[in-house]
Image (cartoon, grey):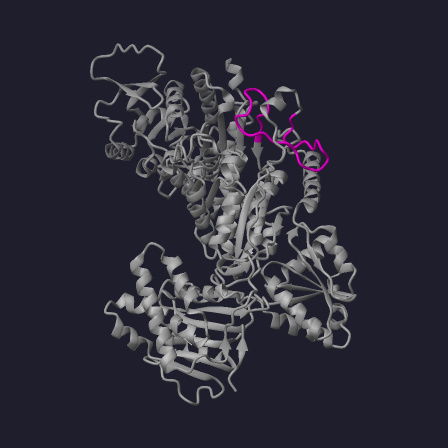
Amino acid sequence: MTHRDYEGSVSTLCAGCGHDSISAAIVQACFELDLPPHRLAKLSGIGCSSKTPTYFLGNSHGFNSVHGRMPSVLTGANLANGSLIYLGVSGDGDSASIGLGQFAHAIRRGVNMVYIVENNGVYGLTKGQFSATADRGSQNKRGSINKDNPIDLIAMALQLGATFVARSFSGDKAQLVPLIKAAIEHRGTAFIDCMSPCIAFNNHSGSTRSFDYVREHNEAVNKLDFMTGRAPITVDFEPGTVELVEQHDGSTLVLRKLASDYNPHDRLAAMSYVQDHTAAGEIVTGLLFIDNEAEDLHRHLDITETPLNALSETELCPGEATLEMINASLR
Amino acid sequence: MPLPRINDFVIRFANINGSGSASANELFARAILRMGVPIAPRNIFPSNIQGLPTWYEVRVSEKGHLGARGGADLMVAMNPQTWEKDVASVEHGGYVFYDASRTRPTAELREDVTFIGMPLTEICNRQYSDARQRQLLKNIVYVGALTALLDIDAEETERLVREQFKSKEKLVASNIEALYIGRNYALEHLSCPIGLQVKRADAVGDRILIDGNSAAGLGAVYGGATVCAWYPITPSSSLPEAFTRYCTRYRVDSETGKNLFAIIQAEDELASIGMVIGAAWNGARAFTATSGPGLSLMQEFLGLAYFAEVPAVIFDVQRGGPSTGMPTRTQQSDILSAAYASHGDTKHVLLFPDNPTEAFEFGALAFDLADRLQTPVFVMLDLDIGMNQWLCRPFAWDDSRLYDRGKVMTAADLDAGKDFGRYLDVDGDGIPYRTYPGTHPTRGSFFTRGSTRDRYARYTEDGGAYIDNMERLLRKFETAKNLVPQPLRRNARMPARYGVIYYGSTHPAMTEAIEGLAAAGNHLDTLRVRAFPFSDEVAEFVTSHDLVFVVEQNRDGQLRTLLVNECNLDPANLIPILHYDGTPITAREITDSIAGHLNVSNVTPLRKVGS
């Protein structure tokens, strides 16, 4: 597979849109993982971010569904065939406003998926209205101030039991690509909140989602390298600054600590750390939480290994004789 | 003069919700069935868990009239809250059986009915020390008394108790004891039997007694459904619960112990239908079950499934609307909101089963139709079918039957170089080919969306491509006409000028009404519509009669509207016969209403009546 086999059609988003960088990071991640593109299904809701699955992985099936409802459609698809990789792409309007309920319930069920929110704090296609993740006090392009409190999807994902939680920035490919790779290999709900500035409506001074603002306030707690099980692991950092995390599939995450007091295995500590730093005006990025013993919905429902969509009459229909017995019990 | 009636009467039990009367009442009903006499039991229950009035009625009919009849010949009045109303509802010459420890009928209440008192509470208080036992076994004690009063075979009843509790010896013993306490008391102290009696007959045949929701849930198992996503709503909840029960029994891999199904109780109806669409898009057979309010919530997704052409099966167990309406009462009032669900120009396939047997058959068939037509298919049940037990034909299945998975291109097809256009009408029937995700590394992938696209699933805002697609969807709907269950016609014994169209749970009442009308010299042909889109036969039936009555259980004549709209029929020739108070329609009403029209010497079209 060449890099081109992972590309999609040409983007119709604005030149310089953060979302296009995320699409490029997805292409890069899948290419580096050498993933057969048809073994991945990409699903989205409605909005700028949800348009992007057309612009990457052209050999994968895609589904641009209903505004805010990608999680339910993806859950159903996942139940039908647990052997594919599911990538859900959403935006802050799609997941934090109209789809907040579905966002929450997919995570609490532990649907095995990569859930990326391309978070720009603003509605693009409808021309610049605040979204539910916009910070209180931030200014829109017309100069009005947002008075509502923001929804912090990271805090929610942690509270709801996501087993892989990360935040990144579309402008930091070096950070984002390994996170996407690790999320793909993670079995369980892997949530990535990706700051993705809107070049058209939310990149001015006074915005807290502009390129400049996010760069200035970005506080990475760690830096992730991703290794597959076959790759030799060479670590040449000082003892105590690097941790190796084994995933279910045998792949290894090499986690270089940037914040010495951050422990990505402690859910409650992570929640508190992120909220403290958010209150201090910082945007905490990196792999914020990982549960290496994650479980997923298929396991909870005890579903057979064979994809449900591949079962035939033989396995599914109890047949005539059984029906006769049922009839007899109803007389 | 007290009513003398053999194998033809209605008994109504007035109980308090949550008092455990349901299983005792069902025992009573089944005992009559075991004597070879057909029954039609019905629950009339409140939206409540405990404390409000609830009724259970059993129509006993050797002739096999299984629709609701209306009225009661014997009232088993166990609820002091509704005592007066219950007594008032008894037919002239009827009977009231009551708990003499709690109620004292006054002579002036009704002089034309026979009051039969039995000190049930006293008997049970003497017999049992535990409060719950006193309550539960009191129900069995009155069933015992009724077997004496109505001359029901005690041994059949006893056998049913044994079958019900099987291995639980203690329960068998205490229930049988209670049964005979009641029976023996009645035989000693009351004049038995009364005028209403059950005589052994041979009129049941091989029929089964089951509720429509269980039957539909079983149909989904036989139809190959593997994914079910649902949100609890009366009166549909027992359908996915039945599916769960049957799956647990018949769908667990015997070798691995793993489930060959996935059932999700979703967070709401939007998520339910979303999951169904996602699963079906990915090639699994998937369904949801809901009622009116849930259907309202699903509208946006149903438009997506119609336009993006994703199969979905929706069981709509209809209740009284609009809004919360009458959540525990029956209606056929979602016809239009299902047929045209969602914004924009849409039309959906609807199936109208008339009883649990058809709920099973259509429940299984719906998955073939959804896959074949790549569109949502609604199975339109109602509370009467869904939550009441009906005596109906046994289920049948042919083991050689294969699932119709519709037009799906495989990796081999793609390798053979077949041209794959997701929305390309290759065969001229409006139905395109699809591929499941993951089929082929380099061919056959496509992007599913609710926005306009061309024949190769590429996004476009071109008006020509849009119309091309919308016209093809109409061709597909035309194809559906011949795939859905066809209407069933029943001709009058002699050539008839008038006809009747009806559907769903109206069937037994209609059958009885037609007999009654014919006996009075009014002959009508009938057509039971079993699906939408309507096959050509439906319009032909209307145009070949002077007038056609359309009998339905809603206020606005929704099927009639659909007929006028879809078949270009003159509304003046379609006379609505409507019943919508939440109770099941009765033969009496239909007969009176149609006879009323016919007796205005010559029936004239609506237009002339109105002008």
Q: Is residue B440 above or below residue A268?
A: above
Based on the displayed image, in which of its 4 quarters is residue B99 positioned?
Answer: bottom left
Which of the pair B232/A68 is nearer the observer?
B232
As displayed, is residue A40 above or below residue A137? above
Q: Choose top left, top right, bottom left or bottom right for residue B471.
A: top right
Q: Tell me: residue B544, above or below residue A229.
A: below
Q: Nearer the viewer, residue B454 or B285?
A: B285
B172 or A5: nearer the viewer: B172
Q: Is residue B589 magenta?
A: no
The picture places residue B512, in percent across and down from the top left corner, at 63, 68
Determine whether, in the image, residue B147 is placed left or right of residue B519.
left
Q: Which residues are magenta?
A: B420-447
Q: Quadrant of the C terminus of chain B?
A: bottom right
Query: Residue B503: x percent and y percent?
Result: 63, 59
Furthest toward the bottom, the residue is B108
Residue B427 sits inside the magenta stretch:
yes
Q: Is residue A76 visible?
A: yes
Q: Residue at x 53, y 50 (%)?
A: B315
